[in-house]
Amino acid sequence: MKRSSADSPIAGSRARWILPLEKRGLLWFLLFLLLTLSLVAAYRVREGRRAGISADGALALTDPELDLLSRLLQQANSSSFRGASPIYKGVYLTSWTAGTARREDLIRLVERTELNALVLDIKDYSGRVGYLSRVSLAQEIGSSQDRIKDIEAFLLRCHRSGIYVIGRIVVFQDPWLAKCRPEWAIKDRDGEIWRDRKGLSWLDPACQQVWEYNLDLAKEAVGKGFDEIQFDYVRFPSDGRISSCRYPFWDQTTPKHQIIRQFFAYASQELAPFRVPISVDLFGLTLWRDDDLNIGQRIIDAMDYVDYICPMVYPSHYPPHFLGFENPALHPYEIVYQSLIRGQSILSRANARARLRPWLQDFDLGARYDAEQIRWQKKATYEAQACGWFLWNPQNRYTESGLEPDWVGRLVALRGAEELEGIRLFSAVTERGWGVSPREGGTGAWR
């Protein structure tokens, strides 16, 4: 089901500028890279910032920078570099934003930074599809909204810039479907549609018709040009009056995690002919707990059926005193790193096919999250050898100062998850040389 790097938009479009250099020899690769460094440094000098090039134009590379260049040259001619899977780094985009002129701002953000991917809602928390769908049930219940009037053109615009587009589908939290098909919805003791703490209604996760509807939307999205399908809210409800839930399909004796595992198996089987990667969003605590958190989510039930497991390791979402921290939100590196290390251990022991690609926090909750917190989280993903990362902000407003320049992202995108030692050096180079240190005007050291 996984795509080769040759099939990927990153390898085909965004990496097009660097792959031919391998064929022309390492000399051209070195010259191009040095030219890029010089241009970036010259710009920073003009802006009056500290740069890795002296005022007279002579290169002034530090030891970490020279080490980075040496390793890149070695890796550029190695089979692991040429055949590695791309590392996806992106941001979340609602269908509402994608239907406005502001979407171009986010595309340009991706183009000028290390980002190379977008996660776009196909069906969001409300149960509404963000474009006019031809899926029969979507048409029958009127779940489509013409938010994105030109979805194919939008996807083409992204692909022309080498942007990998992931379609996100919120599965069992679906107020619109619950309203239109109440016989599939979770009820309360009085037989009314049950609602969680936010007033949102859910479908019974054991209802096969709900599975079919969401997979029909996924298949349609692949046909429109989405590069990957990501399932979210693949679980039982987690908040509200859970004890009052009544399920029309679940027998309440089959373990919840078994129901969720069956959905993953079904999704994998249905999408297999389309050769499209599958990802799933899981609670960050699934990396720490062996049980299913009473919501049916366990990493071991997803890892054999999806390509990417995307734990939501937002530091603000961990309870007080987690890992000994009174406020975990104030310790982004430690929370993200330790969580991912736990997840990597689970996947490694099982020799699982899935890779970790976490969601990172880019919103204020528990603490103010600015460029420094973004960089701490990114550093944690690199050192835990995650296969990329995504930033979450529900308003789609992202901290650009926490992102690296475009050339860094393009190089990192060519690296696989197997050998990430070189990636750690990117932080050392960019922090020291081009004015992108965690603290404005700081030394560039992490602490």
Image (cartoon, helix red, strand yellow):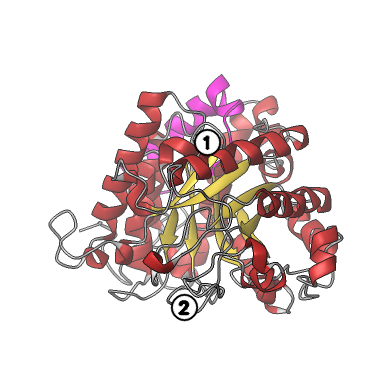
Q: How many marks?
A: 2
Q: Earlier in the sequence, mark 2 or mark 1?
A: 2
Which of discs 2 and 1 lies nearer the camera? The answer is 2
* Vertical placement of residue 290 versus 374, above or below: above
Q: Residues within 10 Å of mark 1 (few under 14, many from 20)?
A: many
Query: Circle 2 is placed at which residue position?
Result: 198
**Screen quadrant of the C terminus:** bottom left
Does residue 217 sit above or below 174 in this rendering? above
Query: Front-most of 186 and 408?
Result: 186
Residue 45 in view (yes/no): no
Q: Is residue 168 one of those drawn in magenta? A: no
Q: Position of residue 34 (x, y in %)?
A: 53, 44
Q: Name the residue under label 1.
A: 415
Residue 186, by quadrant, is bottom right
Q: Position of residue 334 (x, y in %)?
A: 24, 53
The front one of 175 and 354 is: 175
Left or right: where 311 falls relative to 20: left
* Predominant SS of the magenta segment: helix
Name which residue type carries label 2: Lys
Mark 2 nearby-residue class (10 Å; few <14, some 14–19, many ≥20): few
From this viewpoint, which residue is outermost toward the top?
79
Q: Give the range drawn in magenta.
A: 59-87
Mark 2 and mark 1: Cα distance apart in space: 41 Å
**Residue 17 sits in which quadrant?**
top right
| Residue found at the far front of this picture | 190
| In magenta stretch: residue 79 | yes
Of 312 and 155, nearer the camera is: 312
Q: Residue 34 carries which label?
A: none
Q: Where is residue 379 in the image (x, y as percent from the top left)?
A: 35, 50
The secondary structure type at the circle numbered 2 is: loop
Residue at the (36%, 53%) spot, across then down: 294
